Structures are given as C-alpha cells and as structure tokens.
Image (spheres, rainbow, N blue to C red):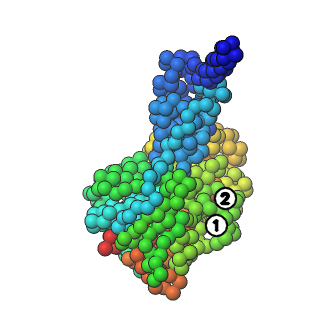
Amino acid sequence: MLKKSVFHLTLAFVLALGVAGCAQKKTSLKDGTYTANTTGHNGPLEVKVTIAEGKIKDIDVSKNVETKGIGSLAIEKIKNKVIEKQTLNVDTATGATISSAATLRALKDALKEAGLTKEAMESMPKESINQVLSEKEYQYDVVIVGAGGAGLTAAIQAREKGAKVLVLEKTSQVGGNTLVSGGGINVPGTDLQKKKGISDSADLYQKDTLKGGDHLGKPELVNTLASRALEAYQWLVKDVKMNFIQDRVQQFGGHSVPRAAIPNGNSGYEMISKLEKLAIDKGVDIFKNTSAKKLMVDDKGVVTGVMGENAGKEVKFIAKKAVVLASGGFGSNIEMRKKYNSTYDEKYKTTCISTSSGDGIKMAKDIGAALVDMKQIQVYPTCNPQTGIISYVANSRFDGGILVNQKGKRFVNDMGRRDVISNAILAQPGQYAYLLWGQEVESNGHMTQIHKNEFENLKKSGLLFEANSIEELAEKTKIDVSTLKKTLETYNKYVAMGSDPEQKRGGKLRSITKGPFYIQKVAPATHHTMGGVAINSKTQVLNEQGKVIQHLFAAGEVTGGIHGTNRLGGNAITDIVVFGRIAGENAAK
C-alpha cells in the first residue's frame, strides 16, 4: 500500500512538472504595440503588432512597398492567419517567398519584444496559407496551365463557350508577369487615340512590330496580333470592365505613333484583378499552389490532360477537350537562359517573377513540340540596379526624360528599341546610366506621383535624387557639372528646333529647364523571352514537322514566333489578350 502511494505521488509530481513545462512554453505576451522593421523584396517593410489580453489582436503591415497582388497579398494572408490561429509557424507563399519570409521575420522580432520566447514560438501550431487539394484526380473540359493574363483570358473565353474550365497556378496568387508589368496595351484605332487626333491603323501597327523584331516574327501571327488588337481592347473595356487613363496614350520605343492605352494605376494589377473576378464570377475553377509537371498523351499523341503536383502529392487533371499552355517564359531560369543564349548569364538580374522558369516550354518539348526563336531574349533598359525590378518611375523617359552617362553625356536615342538602349547602357562606364528630367516632363506624366511608393523607395536607396538645380544633381551623382549643363543646353536647343539631330530621339520632345529636377540611376535586366512553343494563328501547338499536336493550345510568353528578335513595348499585353482569347475559344470547341 505504501509503495502504491509513493508511486501515485511520484506520478502526480511528474505530471505536474509536465504541465508546468507546457505552461512555460505558452509565454504570456505583454499588452502593448510593438514595431519591427526589415527589408522585403522591393524595399523597407514595417510591422506593428498590437497585443491585448495576452493575445495578438491586430497587425499593421501597411508600410511596405511590395508588389501589389503578389508580395502585398502574401503579407495580408500571413497577417490574417497569424491573428486567426495565434501562431508564427506559418509557411511562406509560393511565388512570394521573400515578402513572406520578411513579414514573418519582422513579426518574430516584434513579438520577442512582447515577451515571446524561442521555446514558446517553436511550440506554436503549424499552419499553411497555401491551397491543398483533396482529390487525386479531377476532370474538366479545358485545363489551362498558368493564371497570368493569357491564362485567365483563355479561361474566360472557354467558359463563355460553355466549357467546364480549370486553371492551374503554381504560386499562391494569380497574375504572373502581367501583374508586375506596366499594363500598357498597344491598340490601333482606339477611342483614346481618336480623342487626341492620332491617326493609326492595324497595317501600320503590323509594320512597326515586324520591323521592331527585325522581320523575324511570322507575318501570319503578327497580322493576327494587329488585326484583332482593337476587338481585344474593346472586350477589356466592355466585358472585363477595365479602366484606362482617359487623357494618356503612350508611345513606346519603336512605334510610329502613340498607341498604348494605359490602365488606371499604370500597372498590371488593374487587368489581373478584373480578369480574376470575371473568371470566378463565370465559374472558372483556379487551383493555386499546383504545378504542372508533364502533359498526358494517348497512344496517338493526342493530349489528354496534365499531371500535376500539389502539397508534394501527384494529382491528375483530365482535359476532355483540350489543354492550354499559358505558363509564361523563362526569364528567371538562368540555366535555361544560358542554354539558349550564353550572353544572359548570372550577371543579369531580371524583371520577371521568380517562377518564370519555362515549365510549359519544357513540357511541350517533351512531347515533340517545336520551339522557335529560343535565343531571342530581351533586356529592359531602365531597371533598379540593386534588385533588377523594372522601374515605372523611369517611364518618365516616354514623357521626355533623357539618358546620360556618368560623364554627363547623352549616348543613345532614348526612345529607341529596348535592345539597342540596353546594349548602349552596358557599353557605358559602370554599365549603368542616369535618367534626367524636370517639371516639363513631370507635369505631363506625373510618374513620381503615380508610382509614389517606388519613388520614395528609390530616394531612400540612393538611386534617385530630387533637387532644385542641375548643380545639386551633379554634386549628388558626382557627374561633372559643366558637362551636364552643356548637355542640357544643347538638348534644350534641339527641343526648340523640334528635332534631335544628335540622337534622333522619337516621340514628343520636351525641354528640361524647370525644377525641381530628378535624376535616377538605371541599369538593364532581362525582361522577356521572345522564343517558345511554335503555334499557328489558331494557337494550336505545332510539332517539329509543322503538324498540329491535337488538343494542345498555347498563348502568351510561352509561345515564340510573334516578336522576332525584339518585343516592342506594350506588345506583350496585346499578345496575351489577343491570343489568349483565340486559345480559349478554340480549346472549348
């Protein structure tokens, strides 16, 4: 009896210690507001955590410059999950890992100040913000790989034709490279052009596009692009309900006239948010965090579906009618870039999202699809030298800003082709340039206001300076002031003359005489891959013998043969909408 009593007493003591140990792990957080700062994908990120009654009551993540719809969406998902589940053991969002990790890092730093111990943090439950599928097999009429602009457009069109549609997206958010673009779409004959008295035609647009790509683009495809651009734009306005800036028609380099309609906000978010809403409203299913691994074909070579992966498990997606590849290019895949064009190796940063890895191209090639123009890789001239991210503040170039080198001299046609400008910058001392403009330009484009977050971040990073005099700008950038002033004096004379005999700049010439002035450091980064899967004008994928691969379509940057050696600015958005619509319509038949 005594032994039993001792045993029970000992057991009770051990259990008490265990309970006490568990209680210690559940560290009581001190009430208050705690702030932590870190660096996200695009720049500074601040997190404010409010603790009330020992629990996480609120998280303020409004002070960040992460990409809208990608990094910002991941931050919001993490915030909501942390508050709901009271845990920091949350996974990162696929396709926004840097933004996710930065947010979690800042949250941990803030909560340490509130008394959170390492042991308590490690004992918190694990939660996921990513989508997990429950089935091993799904059946649809049309399966689309990629939820960027081309994929969502194709999905909407296929659904409107009565098909049951599924879109596979390997990241945690829709949008692809369209989301991080400026969103400008080249269209001849728009209402916006007519308001400004701009004369344009599909024929002129086709000629510009063929010439811009050194006539390597297939005339059949370029003709389709140009002839169906206007109806694509009208569809975006009428059906998708996109809003465009009404008093702005932009002229990108290589175009004979201004023809780019610019969406509100001057970013791809306007398009992607509206396309996603319309697709969901029409009943399109979108499976996120689900990557396509290979195309399924029968013994006759007909495509029957997609083998994919979700949460580490294989999932089969049967396509009773067709598969559409809309998975984008390979701008972020360094090994693939080097394979097809060794020039674009590790020394090049990229404007592309991290998941632009050429998956669809590789899957199509594996079943015999022909690839075209694979060595044609485009570099965008005016990017952030530190991150490679495309600069939209630098769109001031299209409004009249000029490029100068470290010596303060002009060296290129600022409105020329992207490849020409990029190569010219890389030939300058330090392989960078400066974009310079004043109030004559700023009052027209308002880029520092439209892209205010980027503008402020560039200033904090020491990449952009604002000053009331040219002398001050020269001092900040260590450019010889006399040379810079002489360059501007000469250029302003050209503006007064109405022509630029030195660099033959196209577009509208605007003087640079009124402050405040701005000067921004820029450098090229890989931006677009013109090569990809061979298609015909119906977007059917072709094999190496030029024959159609049955039940397989492709649209967007995954394809090749449209842009030739160089894609003109604004043509990517036209491409994804025109050919995305065609692919969706034909896939649903």
Residue at left 30%, top 52%? 281
Provide the residue designation for mark 2. 348
Local packing at callout 2 (Cα closer than 10 Å; few below 14, some 14-19, many 20+) is: some
Local packing at callout 1 (Cα closer than 10 Å; few below 14, some 14-19, many 20+) is: many
Q: CA distance from mark 1 to mark 2?
A: 10 Å
Name the side, left or right, on which 156 lies relative to 328.
left
Residue at left 47%, top 39%? 77
Residue lying farthest right? 429
Residue at left 53%, top 17%? 31
Rendering quarter of residue 358: bottom right
Q: Nearer the viewer, mark 1 or mark 2?
A: 1
Q: Amino acid at mark 1?
A: Arg
**Number of numbered discs overlaid on the protein picture:** 2
State the mark number for residue 337: 1
Horizontal and vertical percent position of residue 356: 55, 60
Q: Are marks 1 and 2 in contact (CB under 8 Å)?
A: yes
Horizontal and vertical percent position of residue 214: 53, 76
Horizontal and vertical percent position of residue 287: 43, 55
Name the side, left or right, on which 175 lies relative to 105.
left
Q: Amino acid at mark 2?
A: Tyr
Q: Nearer the viewer, residue 48 or 319?
A: 319
